Image (cartoon, helix red, strand yellow):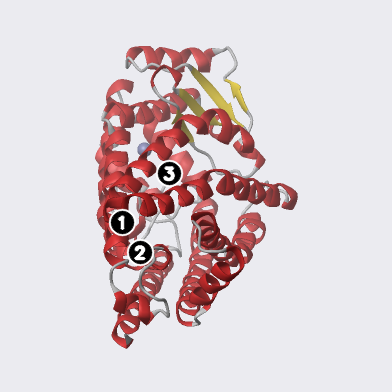
């Protein structure tokens, strides 16, 4: 029994110590390059913008370090204090052991854990982001967003938990395959509902007005045989000055969404290049491939839960009685991150490969890399991105290559050594 707990604690510690080590490594690397504008960025941005990005990176890193220690402490406390078996007992005594009550326990555990993260989320938005001029959210909007998120969790997440528990009752040992099927169906439903019901809860969408930009983007869609129902502008500036672009919907319902902040920051050929990059992801089938990989991951996850639920020693180590699926779901939800963390460099390496492919596609359909390079430079500057991450740090965490890596791959002809 003790051995199980020790292994879990070692895994939690190994993860948080590795993360803290990576933060320290990155911090020293950024500081070493932070005294003056590196040669590679001369002529690309001014000293002041670079210095600001260094300060933003350092401040973010500090907050991350606090967050890592805090989250690891909360996780260890939840696992070792006996609060989980106590909660299970309380729910059984008060509400009974039916699926709806046990689903409520799982939901409540997730809710309490996300509440524990609120103070640091608040600090991030209203202190850190505010200090660097990114925050445009009001406290009222911030709380409203969280309430809406809770409502969505109750309306969509809770029924899914209930269904998984019911599948265990109905099917027995093969439940995990059915639960996986239910999750896939649920995700498909979400993908259909998101553009019409969920996203409009948080933002306003309006068609891109008639004009030269709209004509240019529609011509690009035509040239690349990309079918889209409309091009929409989203009021991202309501929350933050960070910018983005994405697609929603399927087939002929597909919509291209541009943040209003992106339109303010980029020139028309640069916006065209950003859309060309997004179309590149689509043409190279990155989206279904990523979804398929995620589906395999969740299949493995459900299988692991079904195996854990049969390990009496594992249950007793955390103070649970064997014979019920709920503790396995709880413990898996809390602990899976300490194992999957070690897979994140592979997942991110894969994601960076896709970014290079989408960049190459954009350069090809634009017939030159210039507009995309221009867009990437501006976006990195406006978002105060870390331009000099430690290679191990970006290898672990970055879903996108750095600006210099992308320019080098696009053959922009600059000087790419720091
Ligand atoms: Zn991309």
Give the percent coordinates (x, y) of residue 222: 37, 12
Q: At 38% from the left edge and 44% from the top edge, which residue is drawn? A: 183
Q: Are marks 1 and 2 in contact (CB under 8 Å)?
A: yes
Question: In the displayed image of the protein, which residue is found farthest to the right?
Answer: 140
Q: Which residue is mark 2?
A: 336
Q: CA distance from mark 3 to mark 2?
A: 46 Å
**Residue 213 visible:** yes
Q: Ligand 1: which quarter?
A: top left
Q: From what the image shows, is residue 66 above or below residue 218?
A: below
Q: Which mark is residue 228?
A: none
Give the percent coordinates (x, y) of residue 299: 28, 50
Relative depth, front residue between 124 and 322 = 322
Q: Which mark is residue 43?
A: 3
Relative depth, front residue between 399 and 121 = 121
Q: CA distance from mark 1 to mark 2?
A: 8 Å
Q: At 53% from the left edge and 58% from the top edge, which residue is drawn? A: 107
Question: In the displayed image of the protein, which residue is found farthest to the bottom?
Answer: 2
Q: Residues within 10 Å of mark 1 (few under 14, many from 20)?
A: some
- Secondary structure under the numbered disc 2 in the rendered image: helix
Q: Which residue is mark 1?
A: 301
Q: From what the image shows, is residue 149 above or below residue 260?
A: below
Relative depth, front residue between 109 and 416 = 109
Q: At 42% from the left edge and 80% from the top edge, which residue is drawn? A: 319
Q: From what the image shows, is residue 196 above or below residue 118?
A: above
Which of labels 3 and 2 is toward the front?
2
- Secondary structure under the numbered disc 3 in the rendered image: loop
- Secondary structure under the numbered disc 1 in the rendered image: helix
């Amino acid at each position: 029994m003790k051995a199980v707990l020790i292994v879990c604690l070692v895994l939690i510690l190994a993860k948080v110590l590795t993360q803290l080590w990576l933060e320290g490594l990155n911090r020293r690397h950024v500081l070493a390059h932070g005294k003056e504008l590196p040669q590679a960025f001369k002529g690309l941005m001014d000293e002041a913008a670079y210095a600001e990005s260094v300060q933003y990176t350092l401040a973010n890193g500090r907050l991350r370090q606090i967050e890592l220690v805090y989250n690891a402490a909360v996780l260890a406390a939840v696992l070792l204090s006996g609060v989980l078996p106590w909660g299970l007992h309380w729910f059984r005594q008060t509400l009974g052991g039916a699926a709806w009550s046990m689903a409520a326990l799982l939901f409540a555990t997730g809710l309490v854990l996300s509440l524990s993260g609120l103070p640091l989320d608040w600090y991030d938005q209203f202190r850190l982001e505010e200090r660097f001029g990114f925050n445009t959210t009001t406290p009222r909007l911030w709380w409203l967003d969280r309430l809406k998120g809770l409502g969505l969790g109750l309306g969509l997440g809770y029924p899914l938990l209930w269904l998984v528990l019911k599948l265990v009752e109905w099917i027995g040992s093969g439940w995990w395959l059915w639960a996986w099927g239910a999750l896939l169906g649920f995700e498909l439903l979400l993908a259909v509902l998101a553009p019409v019901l969920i996203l409009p809860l948080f933002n306003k969408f309006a068609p891109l007005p008639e004009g030269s930009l709209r004509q240019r983007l529609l011509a690009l869609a035509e040239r690349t045989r990309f079918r889209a129902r409309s091009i929409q502008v989203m009021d991202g500036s309501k929350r933050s000055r960070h910018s983005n672009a994405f697609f929603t919907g399927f087939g002929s319902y597909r919509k291209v969404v541009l943040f209003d902040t992106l339109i303010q920051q980029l020139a028309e050929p640069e916006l065209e290049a950003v859309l060309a990059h997004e179309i590149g992801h689509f043409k190279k089938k990155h989206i279904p491939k990523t979804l398929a990989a995620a589906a395999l991951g969740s299949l493995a996850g459900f299988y692991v839960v079904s195996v854990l639920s049969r390990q009496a020693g594992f249950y007793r180590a955390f103070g649970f009685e064997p014979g019920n699926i709920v503790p396995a779901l709880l413990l898996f939800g809390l602990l899976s991150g300490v194992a999957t963390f070690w897979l994140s460099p592979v997942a991110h390496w894969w994601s960076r490969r896709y970014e290079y492919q989408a960049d190459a596609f954009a350069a090809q359909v634009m017939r030159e890399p210039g507009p995309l390079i221009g867009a990437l430079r501006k976006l990195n500057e406006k978002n105060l991105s870390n331009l000099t991450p430690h290679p191990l740090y970006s290898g672990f965490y970055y879903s996108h290559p750095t600006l210099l890596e992308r320019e080098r791959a696009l053959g922009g002809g600059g000087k790419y050594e720091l």
